[in-house]
Image (tube, rainbow, N blue to C red):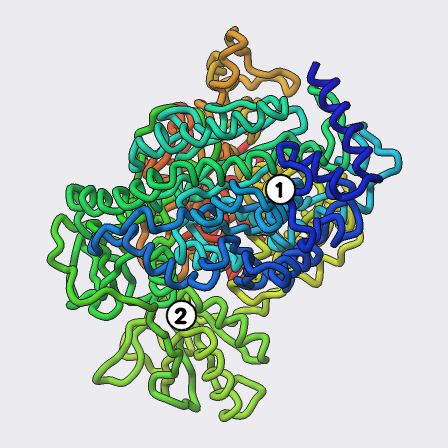
Amino acid sequence: MLKTYFSTAFLAFGVAFTAPAVAQNSYFFPAAQTGSFDPAVPTPEQFLGYPIGSHYTRTDQIVAYLRELDRVSDKVSLRVLGTTFEERPQVVATITAPQHQQNLAGLQQARRALVDPKLAAPDYRALPVVVSLNFGVHGNESSSSEAALLLAYYLTASTSPETKQWLEQAVVTIDPLENPDGRDRASHWFDQNKSWPNVTDPLDREHTEAWPGGRTNHFYTDLNRDWLALTQPESRARMAFFHEWYPNVMIDFHEMGTNGTYYFEPSKPFSTENDLIPRATYEVLNVHLAKYFAKALDNLGSLYWTKEQFDNLSPIYGSTYPDFQGGVGITFEVGSSRGLAQEGTNGVVTFPFTIRNHVATGLATVRGAVEEKELYLRHQRDFFTSAVTEGRKFPTQAYVFGNAQDQTLTNKFLTLLLQHKIEVHELGKTVTLDKQQFEKGKAYVVPTSQPQYRVVHSLFEELTTFHDSVFYDVTGWSQAHAYGLAVSKQKSTGLVQGTPITAPKTLNGTIRGGSSSYAYLLPWSEYNAPRALTALQRAGLTAKVSFKPFRAGPADSPTDFGYGTLVVPVAAQKLPVDSVFQIVSRVSRQNQVTFTGVGTGFSVGGIDLGSNNIRTVPETKAALLVGTGTNAAEVGEAWFTANQQLGLPLSRIELSNFGRAPLGRYTALVLVGGSYTSLDKAAIDKLRRWVQEGGTLITLKNASEWVIKQGIVKEKLLIPANAGWADTTALAVALAETAPPTPKATRPPKAETPLARRADFAEQEQEGTRAIAGSIYSADIDITNPIGFGLTNRRLYVFRNGTTFLRPSRNPYATVAQYTASPLVSGYVSRNNLRQIRNSAAVVVSKVGTGRVVLFADDPNFRHYWHGTSRLFTNALLLGPLLNLPEGPAAISAEEEN
């Protein structure tokens, strides 16, 4: 029955392709009466020159149409929020009644009473409800941005009394392009590969995007996971706009697989919801709106589902962050055509059909929000009032954070808190808390009793108790652990003093002691120190790194310099003394770090500057294998870390080009997680020779498994690779956990897999209970190893979402980071996987000839915000050639190993 409906809908819309604009209106707005649109407002079809749904609209065309609505109507204002990495504008159209358009700033000010409990309650009848409609955060989920054009047209052009009432009672913001760069990457693919007539075969090129696809932004970042971390410019611009309005209802429009129908919330009760959020959000507001969505789709005859799969667990999504701000955030997912038309289990899914479903639920959203306006406004006021109360009850009354030895990272975290409108105070005195020193002016205090208590809790606290064991995404999202800064939980507010900070501190990089004719020193503990090294080298200077700590500077006020300290000897440079000073000064300012100029190589304590323990750092020439088979997200993370954090050019080599790559020009090569089966024996031998001749190979997650299985290194997996247990899928691990134990004296043949118990068909969804659901662990890090340089605490927080288990090396110096005996800090992990993680290796450096392989069990650059472990990755890139490990007393030969 549905197959006939889908096909009929497609044929009906085919008529609209050649009919006047009114025919297209009747398809997308079937309930609208003929003549109920202002003819002075052009339809999208009239402006673009083609019917919506017959072509994928480029981002510049989408922006141009909204500019036209702004020009012709006093109900619309278009604003540019920022630009993307590829210089595309981020825009938002605000649509409301003309008198509201003249007073947007006044409305925002009046709405402050909803989010600030210190202010008197507002007159709810006088305030408009704010509805935020957001489209295309995943660029290849393309029906959403097309729907944005139609919704903007309807709200602008409709002359119906109902629409007039909506705009009197609501401010509607439309973000048509949450991910402009990904949108254009996808739309170009679909438009370049479409056919006449349409090819509905799912294997047609039109429906199978090439790697990396258009889902993500320029650096392959999933922007729908960036609402809390704010690592990307698109996210930061959007967050600033969000906090101007604090939407009461916010919708994130998505697509899912072609075989899906339509999803809207409510989500699965309790198990996919966050206990910090008042139950009214899920049980009243969500359910109320769901009735409007259901009616809209019922009127179209479209199938839908709720209460499954997608979650509201953390504030990392565009559909969940509003829940933490007193609004209600909702995900819409429509079964995708991924092209103009594609066969699915429900029949042929067409692009116009997917657009129409989104248009229907978009209009239903505005209708539901307006009809129960006061409910949503009162909820937001109550939400922020209860946040202050809940924060006051919470055992931790304040968090103190900061690292005087790493002001750049401390400032970065402070900036993140202020972007979330969190109340932060500067620490008024130097104190020692939990055996950690926090210095006045270099540390900060965050009280929990504040309107943003629930976001504060999410940023700082651990979570290990859940209602379920099957999850859609990560279960550990604490940014405090990700940054790796010192944090102390206080049971009183005694350290909360003075007025809250309104802006992050400006760090003025400088040279302490001024110009020097001998040397400049920079502690490697500063987060921006590696970037400063790259800048110095690219400017033509030679730099060294210290393998032992020392004390230097004026005798009356010397400074302790730790492992990894940069030393820039002046006399060894090819440039004049003044030129060296100018370069170091510029680098210090640009990277907000402080160098120390010294006039002698004779240290006050420790090694002297001419010691063999201070070694020249070769300039890094790095490459990254990319393309089909590699994990695009991890590729983007490594690329972003090298390019944006280090300022380091990183060559991205397609796997298909590896055979002709001149590896000799590179000092480091990165392999992220993925499949490397496309590399034949000749390619593997080439890679092995390059490492043996001095190269630094850096492998992440199951790429580390791959180099072990290929015999490039002599390290071992915790579970034998030939047992079939070390695959990165949760299912393979689950099978291994139910298998009978293998005797130590024998190994199963390669063709065998562990026997699994019988299971009921309905149990298959519980395989997720055996996975590692993106959680946080503690490890012990050797801070005297170059991989650990810059860290000042041996305790390291590591994020894991894979099942690569590395055995600690037989060389005691080679296991740089090892999970602790009780490693779980936050998030969910199965008991069996937790046993595997305990005491396993997180990072191993394996010597191969004159080169080395740095094996990471996990992804150290996860989603660009795991700064504690990304240091290890940058150290491997920059300092890899200096990793000459001693064999150690426990090292054994290959013959003994076998």
Dots 1, 2 in contact, CB < 8 A: no
Residue 144 circle label: 1
The residue closer to the viewer here, 10 or 666, is 10
Residue 557, percent from left and from top: 23, 81
Q: Residues within 10 Å of mark 1 (few under 14, many from 20)?
A: many
The three-letter code of the residue at mark 2 reads Thr
From the image, which quarter does the N terminus lie in? top right
Residue 196 circle label: none
Earlier in the chain: of badge 1 and badge 2, it is: 1
From the viewer's perspective, tell me whether residue 5 is left or right of residue 89. right
* Residue drawn at x 54%, y 62% as measured from the top left: 79
Residue 12, located in which quarter of the rendered image?
Answer: top right
Q: Is residue 779 visible?
A: no
From the viewer's perspective, tell me whether residue 407 is left or right of residue 253. left
Residue 504, percent from left and from top: 34, 68
Residue 565 circle label: 2
